[in-house]
Image (tube, rainbow, N blue to C red):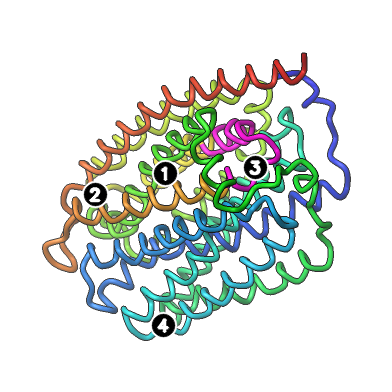
Amino acid sequence: MDNNYKTAAFTSYEKFVIAILSLLQFTVIVDFMVLSPLGAMLMPSMGISTSRFGLVVSAYAISAGVSGLMAAGFADRFDRKKMLLFFYAGFVLGTLFCGIANSYAFLLAARIFTGIFGGVIGSISFAIIADSFRMEVRGRVMGFVQMAFSASQVLGIPIGLYLATRFDWHAPFLMIVTVSVPVGIVILLKLKPVTGHLHARQDKKAFVHLWHTASNPFYLRGFMATMLLATGGFMIMPFSSAFLVNNILIPETGLSMIFFITGLFSIFTGPLLGRLSDSFGKFRLFVFGSILSMVTVFVYTNLGPNPIWVIILTNTVLWVGISSRMISSSALTSGVPDMMDRGAYMGINSSIQHVSGGIASFVAGLIVYQPTKTAPLQHYDIVGYVTICTMMITMVMMYFIDRQVSEKLRVASA
């Protein structure tokens, strides 16, 4: 990429867009991520097995995937701001349902409802970013948005876990609702309409537009890479807290500290990795992050009882690897679709990500099992080996995507 990223300065409105989208992503990510750490409390509280808990986690992802696919055909036909507000309102309502769920069936239904709306928000946000920022600075933008993941660990998850231990597991979801409502109001009042794609859009019916985007050979590699990217993380994450408590023998009260310190470190590395993505190269950073993640996943999933500082160090290194992969891959794949297809592409991409992740979570629940409520998890190392294999294949896929995007930009600038 060119070196204009060094001198390119964001305007005050661009900074606002980055900030508000990061806050929005923060609420959505906390809603999704907080459920996994709550597993150690929720499973014994409701008396459910690892497979049933895995279904609760995957229910959000699968419903989000179906919703994203259904919305993709319409994604380029409306102002992206209006689309964002509609789905965000549904997400807040679904999270409220999770906060008042009093049975396993109610919770499962609430997660499905939340996924229907929440799963589309990320694709709309990334479409807004791609519409608003040049490819040369998207790594920086993704780096700042990535801070939402880190902030969810520093603030959202530790506070959520504290509230869960202080009250019960419903409290974190009610906290998310309290934070989300003001964010939605600011978006309604301050975010400008995003309509540039409407001028470039071809006059196609929704289903035709969806089909042409989904069947475009130029886009298929991006969809395949997304499928593999989602598989690894969704297999490891749902049972991480139960693994720490039952296998590593970390007390439940220590989980908040682990997430807090890991996330605090990640807040500072996110923008740095974003700059490296633009300067060092998006694919090169992806390879670095993948290798680092593979080594750390192998170590992590084979750990036995260890002091908490070892777990904090391992989690921090793993998060650097994951962040490198997420930032670089998000920035790189944003260059795949044309503007007229961007909303549909991001919607399909999000759908594939959620469905693949949901299936991966469910499969992980079948691989991992716990003989009793307090016994160590069995076969968590096998989940790690499967994750490593997907990371290796994804590196090959991203190599071809990098070449594809580079050629597209070269032709566009010629």
Marked residue nearer the N-terminal end (4 or 3): 4
Mark earlier in primary sequence (3, 2): 2
Q: Quadrant of the C terminus?
A: top right
Magenta stretch: residue 340 in it? yes
Residue furthest top as drawn: 414
Inter-mark Cα distance, 3 to 2 = 47 Å
Callout 3 secondary element: helix
Question: Which one is nearer the viewer's eye here, 168 or 111?
Answer: 111
Frontmost of labels 4 and 3 is: 3
Q: Disc 2 and disc 4: Cα gap in Å? A: 35 Å
Q: Magenta residues?
A: 326-346
Residue 21, quarter of the rendered image: bottom right
Q: Nearer the viewer, mark 1 or mark 2?
A: 1
Q: State the residue in front, 89 or 307.
A: 89
Residue 305, disc? 2
Q: Position of residue 45 (x, y in %)?
A: 29, 78
Secondary structure beneath dot 1 equals helix
Residue tagged by mark 4?
Answer: 101
